[in-house]
Image (cartoon, grey):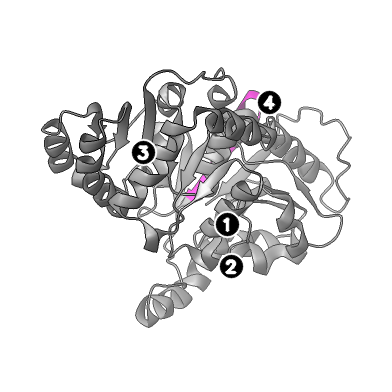
């Protein structure tokens, strides 16, 4: 989603955008749906995937790098924009071999492996959190925030009413862990007769059984497989319970929403926990570790806000202080500067002029 936000900004400035990704990644669905061109490479991960998968990835790397090099040449790429991840590795490597400037975005508190390895060669690193700057050369990074849809920034503050509306989401595919804890919490909310309404994005696999069971509880709300208009769901919510990926954290701060964050424990370098800790330090969220997540704990955390509505407003205000609008615009400006002056350092105050001849290469 951050890459798509930057792509739209680039197109609005008169540039052409090309994505590079894999047919197995989420980009295979999201990029064509958004109307952008995409080229394919074959590459897998190396972390937490087992020895066989790691060896296969290492064997694929030279071929995917060579294909990426040909694509960059074919499209005369002026710059490469990378969000990291395993599919970015061959494209970033090819860009470095061609001396094509690379601008990377690191949305998490701890950079992923690809961004760590490429840190010293990048033209500019755009960061979601200030604490990440230590991983990059001095003077070569800046905190821009993570690009999210403008709609999140335009949501008005929500005054707590008699009924607390809780949005629970584990991402577009749902979270089995969150789904199970939600199911376990139903009897507790029934017994407490708590004034709570739920909006739960369960994912397609668990949706049918979860929705059928929830309907029998008599609790207020609905269980959906997927929420297409997430800003609208945020607008209804007083409290959000979910994972703490970089995109989710950026949306929470943009919307100024208080949250209970349950970091995915198997994220690379445990970066989701670091993201959640950053919001918790700012009093914008409460963190609940995955191992601690039960129906009883979920009930306890939500009831904390039922019994203290002032806490919602305090945390909402704290979340808004972390919001950084204009991240997509700044990323586009830096890419324009990189495409014109690949060997010069970025001037943060400099103005970017439109260059419609540039083709900006974007990679996952």
Residue found at x 81% / y 28%: 353
Q: Is residue 47 above or below residue 271?
A: below
Q: Is residue 214 left or right of residue 97?
A: left
Label 1, secondary structure: give it: loop
Residue identified by numbered label 3: 168
What label does residue 93 carry, if any? none
Marks 4 and 1, the one that precedes in the sequence = 4
Q: Nearer the viewer, mark 3 or mark 4?
A: 3
Badge 2: few (under 14), some or many (20 or more) residues near its Cα, within 10 Å? Answer: some
- Disc 2, disc 1: CB below 8 Å? yes
Q: In x, y percent, where is residue 267?
A: 47, 62
- Residue 185, picture quadrant: top left
- Disc 4, disc 2: CB below 8 Å? no
- Disc 3, disc 4: CB below 8 Å? no
Marks 2 and 1, the one that precedes in the sequence = 1
User: Mark 2 to mark 1: distance in Å?
Assistant: 8 Å
User: Mark 3 to mark 2: distance in Å?
Assistant: 30 Å
Start and end of the magenta stretch? 11-20
Which of the two residues, 320 or 5, is positioned nearer the viewer here? Answer: 320
Q: In x, y percent, where is residue 275?
A: 58, 53
Can residue 149 be seen by looking at this rendering? no
What label does residue 84 carry, if any? 1
Q: In x, y percent, where is residue 293?
A: 36, 56
Residue identified by numbered label 2: 113
Q: Is residue 183 above or below residue 157?
A: below
């Amino acid at each position: 989603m951050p890459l798509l936000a930057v792509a739209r900004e680039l197109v609005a400035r008169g540039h052409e955008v090309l994505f590079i990704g894999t047919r197995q990644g989420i980009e295979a669905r999201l990029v064509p749906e958004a109307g952008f061109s995409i080229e394919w490479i074959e590459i897998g991960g190396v972390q937490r995937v087992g020895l066989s998968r790691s060896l296969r990835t290492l064997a694929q790397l030279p071929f995917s790098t060579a294909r990426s090099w040909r694509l960059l040449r074919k499209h005369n790429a002026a710059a490469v924009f990378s969000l990291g991840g395993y599919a970015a590795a061959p494209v970033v490597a090819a860009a470095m071999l061609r001396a094509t400037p690379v601008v990377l975005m690191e949305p998490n508190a701890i950079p992923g492996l690809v961004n760590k390895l490429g840190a010293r060669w990048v033209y500019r690193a755009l960061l979601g959190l200030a604490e990440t700057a230590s991983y990059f050369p001095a003077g070569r990074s800046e905190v821009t925030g993570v690009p999210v849809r403008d709609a999140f920034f335009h949501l008005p503050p929500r005054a707590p009413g008699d009924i607390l509306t809780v949005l629970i989401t584990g991402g577009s595919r749902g979270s089995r862990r969150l789904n199970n804890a939600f199911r376990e919490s139903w009897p507790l909310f029934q017994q407490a007769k708590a004034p709570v309404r739920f909006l739960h994005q369960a994912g397609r696999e668990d949706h049918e059984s979860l929705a059928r069971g929830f309907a029998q509880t008599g609790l207020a709300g609905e269980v959906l497989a997927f929420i297409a208009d997430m800003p609208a769901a945020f607008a209804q919510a007083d409290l959000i319970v979910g994972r703490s990926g970089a995109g989710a954290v950026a949306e929470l701060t943009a919307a100024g929403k208080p949250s209970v964050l349950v970091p995915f424990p198997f994220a690379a370098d445990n970066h989701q926990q670091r993201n959640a800790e950053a919001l918790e330090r700012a009093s914008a969220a409460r963190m609940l570790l995955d191992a601690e997540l039960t129906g009883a704990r979920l009930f306890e955390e939500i009831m904390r806000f039922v019994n203290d509505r002032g806490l919602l407003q305090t945390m909402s205000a704290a979340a808004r202080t972390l919001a950084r609008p204009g991240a997509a615009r700044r990323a586009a400006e830096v890419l324009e500067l990189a495409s014109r002056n690949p060997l010069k350092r970025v001037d943060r105050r400099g103005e970017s002029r439109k260059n419609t001849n540039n083709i900006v290469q974007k990679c996952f």
